[in-house]
Amino acid sequence: MPSVWLRRKLNGAGLLSMAEVAATPHVSCAEPEAGVPPPPLGRGAHPTTLRVLAGQPLEVRQVAEWKDTERRRVGVRNTERGVLEDTFAARPGWTTSTNEKEQAAVGPPVRE
């Protein structure tokens, strides 16, 4: 999957991007609510890091199996024998960077 930085730049420029995604990462099909969680009651450090507050992420494989997930034949690239095509499941989704080193939950979720 492309880096969070690249995905945010593409999204900010209004460009459509596609990437091969493993079956196990989590995505949200509706934009999740992001923010800094409230401080815990009593003692403890106050949170300062942006996190997903509301919205239930699902594994990519679960979303791909939904009946309303559209499958399209897409031309991937030109080859010496013509256009390389295959069928892909595609739908918009939001990802967060919680599993990427040094970018854990930084910035808003990215719509893809």
Image (cartoon, rainbow, N blue to C red):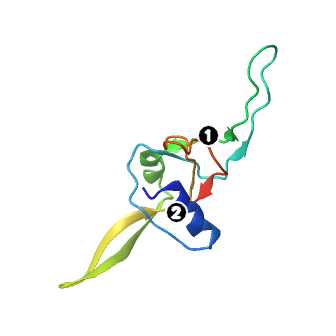
Name the side, left or right, on which 85 lies relative to 5.
left
Q: 30 or 46, which lies in front?
A: 46
- Percent from the top left, x then y, of residue 78? 28, 83
Q: Residues within 10 Å of mark 2 (few under 14, many from 20)?
A: few
Name the residue type under label 2: Leu
Separation (CA) of disc 2 from disc 1: 24 Å
Can I make out residue 82 in this image?
A: yes
Label 1 residue SS: loop
Q: Label 1 neighbourhood size at 10 Å, few (<14), some (14-19), many (20+)?
A: few
Residue at x 50% of width, y 41% of height: 99
Q: Nearer the viewer, residue 62 or 45?
A: 45
Q: Position of residue 9 (x, y in %)?
A: 58, 66
> Along the horizontal axis of the image, is 39 left or right of 111?
right
Q: Relative to 89, say whether 39 is above or below.
A: above
Q: Earlier in the sequence, mark 2 or mark 1?
A: 2
Residue at 81 percent across and 17 percent down: it is: 41
Left or right, 41 with respect to 94, comes to right
Please identify the quarter of the rendering in which residue 12 is found.
Answer: bottom right
Relative image position of residue 34 (x, y in whole percent): 71, 45
Marks 2 and 1: which is nearer the front? 2
> Quadrant where the C terminus lies?
bottom right
* Relative image position of residue 101 (x, y in whole percent): 49, 42
Q: Is residue 112 visible?
A: no
- Secondary structure, mark 2, is helix
User: Residue 6, which numbered label?
Assistant: 2
In the image, residue 49 above or below residue 71: above
Inspect the image, locate mark 1, and give the three-letter code of the amino acid beneath it: Gln
Kindly identify which residue carries mark 1. 56
